[in-house]
Amino acid sequence: MVATLGRRSRRGRALTLRRGGGAGVLTRGHATIMSPQTIACFPNRPSSCGLLRQTKRLVSFTSPLLGHEESMADPFTLGVASGEPLPDGVMLWTRLAADPLSADPSRPGGMAPRAVEVSWQLAEDENFTRGLRQGVTEAQPAWAHSVHVRVAGLKPGTDYYYRFRASGAQSPVGRTRTADDPASTRPVRFALANCQRYEHGFYTAYRHLADERPDVVFHVGDYIYESRQAPSVARPLGTLPGEANTLAEYRLRYARYKSDPDLRAAHAAAPWVPTWDDHEVADNYRGTGDGSAAFQRRRAAAYQAYFENQPIRVRPRGGGLQMFRRRTYGTVADFLVLDVRQHRGAGTMLGAAQEEWLISRLVTGRVRWRVLVQPLFFARRFVPGPAPNLRTDSWDGHQEQRARILAAGAPGLVVLSGDVHNAWAGELKADFLDPGSATVGVEFVASAISSRPPATDGPAVLAANPHLRFFDGHRGYLSGTAGPDELRVAFRAIDHVDRPGAPVTTVAEFRTVGEGLTSENATSK
Ligand SMILES: [Fe+2]
């Protein structure tokens, strides 16, 4: 079969691909490929997911669930979300905010400091007639009137629709989906997003991601930026443009970010499994920072605001929040979601407990793909030019721990990452300094949703790192499918974020096949 793909050859010449006895020519004007039998590029074409309908707003609940409701301005301005899909359940989320950008710290979201009853419904159809479940909970002022509903007893691999009602108002309808049955071999369709600095641009990429309605969306950090407003902006932060430090300021930053309708659409379109990077708290922070009480207070406030604004299962406790976890889809994929910030210390990116957990998950079970979902560039990335040539905040600053992970011998190892605001793909090597060493996995680095990239000489970095095979400088996200026989990843890209409405294109699509990803020929680019 012929495999053409993506955008352009790195060296502007035709490339030959061999896979399973077939042969193909990668035509001029297309993207860099991965090595034969490891990753092959596929025709530049719209996502195999196709364009599906967006979630529709629906009519009000057919009958009020509450006897008494005090009316207020629409409290569902921050949208709805779902997350943490299991084979039998999901989390449902909303946060009431009648005046989301209210700067009064005693009334986050413009809400009076008292509990509000919130009713919820979930069903298998958009008309809420099949398999209807419902309940009532309380939105507490101590948690900024956020609502985290655990729904259990659901069918695996099934779409559901949900909505909330509070104070006489009804929420938009969200679509969610449970994880597949543990014995399932069904391919899972996932998306990966990260880095969405509000002032840097519009979240158009999220509109396209929402249209794809993947089974699950992973977010690998920089959901907010705590930073002072950027000097030049595509759109201003508005209220409180200074650096966020307090709980009220972090809450307000989330409210500003969620004012973007495309972000709300992405949450309403699919369940999310998020993890964080640094900007949810402070730039490049590690663990307990400088150890001061002031930083502990700041981190605890940031973690609380994160929980309040994400559809996650676990609440913060004692100033920490249990973040690393796995989400499994049948026998196809074990998504191992990492926390590269909270437990970081001298010589360790993950901390001992998380590393032990990760290594054990990498070598147990019979799942086809073991997918690390985490923010930071994992492969070695030597940047030619003046020192420093390696970025110490990333995995190049934790080479021993990275080597232990790669030495675990995980079958079907895939790393999904972000952070650098450009798109990359590459191979993971047993020894990054020896191009002839075994290929032990693959990495796909998602570009940013909106954050501006640093000046990057992509071709020079590719030339200096033989295991890196693809670079693209657009904003965008990853759209992938993990199946029993192959893992396919499309780089979805938009060409502007300074104004809404950019169309999306697939700049490259890669396919990973074979047992253990061991490449017998890692030399072709
Ligand atoms: Fe970022």
Image (tube, grey):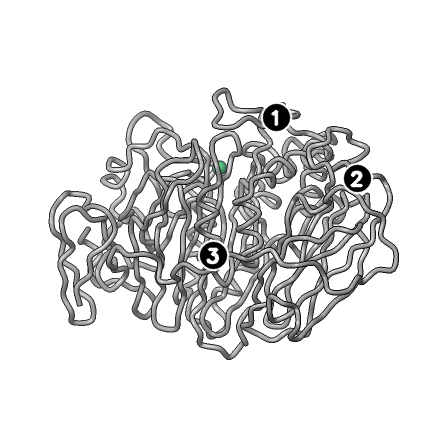
121 vs 245, nearest the viewer: 121
Left or right? Give the position of 298 relative to 179.
right
The residue beneath circle 1 is: 238
Image depth: mark 3 or mark 2 in front: 2
Q: Reading the chain from its start, which is encountered first: label 2 or label 1?
A: 2
Q: Amino acid at mark 2?
A: Met
Residue depicted at x 52% and y 65%: 361
The residue beneath circle 3 is: 372
Q: Residues within 10 Å of mark 1 (few under 14, many from 20)?
A: few
| Label 2 near ligand 1 (CB < 8 Å) | no
Left or right? Give the position of 206 relative to 422.
right
Q: Reading the chain from its start, which is encountered first: label 3 or label 2?
A: 2
The residue beneath circle 2 is: 111
- Residue 346 seen in the current view: no
Coordinates of residue 395 in the picture (x, y in percent): 44, 44
Q: Reading the chain from its start, which is encountered first: label 1 or label 3?
A: 1
Mark pair 2, 1: CA separation: 20 Å
Residue depicted at x 39% and y 30%: 454
Quarter residue 122 falls in = bottom right
260 vs 399, nearest the viewer: 260
Left or right? Give the position of 349 relative to 303.
left
Coordinates of residue 388 in the picture (x, y in percent): 38, 29
User: Which numbered tag is attached to residue 201?
Assistant: none
Coordinates of residue 42 in the picture (x, y in percent): 25, 59
Q: Residues within 10 Å of mark 3 (few under 14, many from 20)?
A: many
Q: Secondary structure at mark 2?
A: loop
Q: Residues within 10 Å of mark 2 (few under 14, many from 20)?
A: many
Q: Amino acid at mark 1?
A: Gly
Mark pair 3, 2: CA separation: 39 Å
Asked if disc 3 and disc 2 are in contact, CB closer than 8 Å, the reply is: no
83 vs 402, nearest the viewer: 83
